[in-house]
Image: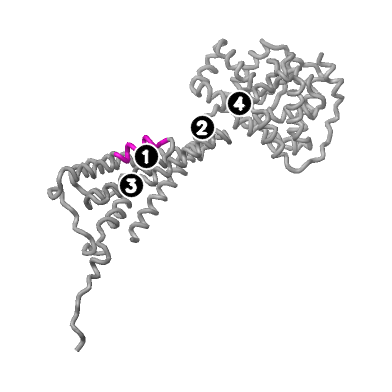
Amino acid sequence: MNKNIRDLTVIVIIAFAIWAGFTYISTTTEKQDLVSLEQEEDIADFFNRQIFREYDSLDVGLTDSVMNIVFSRLTDPMDSLRYDYNIYVLKSDQVNAFTAFNGQLFVFTGLIDQTETPEELAAVLAHELAHAEKRHVIKNLVKEIGLNSLILIISGGDPVIMQEITKLVVSSGFSRSMEKEADEYAIQYLKDAKINPNRLTQFFLKLKQKNREIPESLEWISSHPALKERIEFVSENVGDSIEEIPIAVDWEAFKGSLK
Amino acid sequence: MTTENFHTIPQPDEMDIREKEDAMGAYLMMFAALGAGLPLPILNLIAAIVYYYINKGKSLFVRFHSLQSLLSQLPTSILNAVAVFWGARIVFFDYAFTDVFKGYLWLVGIANLIYIIFSIIGAVKARKGEMYYFLFFGRVSYQSVFKKEETDAKKTVNQPPKM
């Protein structure tokens, strides 16, 4: 009878070892699969050129300083940042914001126009910042087109394929788990920055109410699925209410300067 | 545990072809049922138990192989069932295809592979009229099937009165 118990124990231990071993392998291979930061810089160069070919960027002094005030409010409490972030404002009516490579964040004037306070923009940026910190863009691309093709494209820089990649990045079609993770971290960033995390859902809801039919220009909303579910997720995870410290920026004047 | 408490093991030349085929069938049937029962792994467990009870009375040899096949598919069925429900949970509720789940899928794959290989070997051996013991399940099945009933060992022997 003792032999039976011994054999059963051996089987159970082997099974757990296989499980743990393959879990470990899956975890480490995912990390290895990723493109290195240097490679990402190269992709960012190609990508930025492509973006600036398609959109006009606003590079006036005021825009720059206001965006930096809002963004540094988020990043100041953070211990370390993965990238040296750059925020570009693109002139377009699209209500959209997206994360590209190597810490390049893009916001369309259309989205800024829809915000009523700088805190709302901070909430959108917190979400994009989380995508960047978690390297979702690269992970997504590796998933969509494979690591080998991605490296091939970087080295070749084929303009047609770069255009396709650009489309993919601008439409920010992340998986649900990535969106959830980005929301999760955005809540944390906003809390640390003393901004009410509910700003994120407020902005969602407001946009949804304003544009009941969701026109195509509302990229940022339409690319983010299951809105109701996410609002619920954010409100459930907001936790204790925090006292918001407003961002001292003349928002209306700033919005006016974009036109 | 001595061999005296156990029935003698039948030898290949003592069995007819029907008996050998029934023993082989235990592995093949349950092995086929595992595939058919994949969407709901509990179904093939029911099929396996039914097969075991049908063949239970035939002979110790058939009964041993049926029981070994039934017992050895238990862990695989449980692993598969968990994989199906866990997978469904991921698809319908939390959407996160985690590394822990990936590792688990590997475990399920390996367990199924080992089960299939051993079932095939078991089926071939059974067809030849040989006993074949899986790790753990072989011994448990042998002990359960070949052990003599307690009443056989404690046969009443009438004694004269003490004088």
Q: Specify the segment rendered in magenta.
A: B29-38
Give the chain of mark 1. B
Residue A181 is tagged as none
Marks 4 and 2: same chain? yes
Q: Amino acid at mark 2?
A: Gln
Residue A174 is tagged as 4
| Mark 1 to mark 2 CA distance (whole Å) | 29 Å
Q: Amino acid at mark 1?
A: Asn
Residue that carries the numbered disc 3 in the rendered image: B70
Q: Is residue B37 magenta?
A: yes
Give the chain of mark 3. B
The one nearer the camera, A176 or A151, is A176
| Mark 1 to mark 4 CA distance (whole Å) | 34 Å
Q: Nearer the viewer, mark 3 or mark 2?
A: 3
**B39 relative to A142 in the view: left or right:** left
| Mark 4 to mark 3 CA distance (whole Å) | 45 Å
Give the chain of mark 2. A
Indicate which disc, 4 or 2, sits on the residue closer to the N terminus: 2
Residue A32 is tagged as 2
Marks 1 and 4: same chain? no
Q: Amino acid at mark 4?
A: Phe
Density class for disc 4 (Cα within 10 Å; few <14, some 14-19, many ≥20) is many
Marks 1 and 2: same chain? no
Q: Secondary structure at mark 2?
A: helix
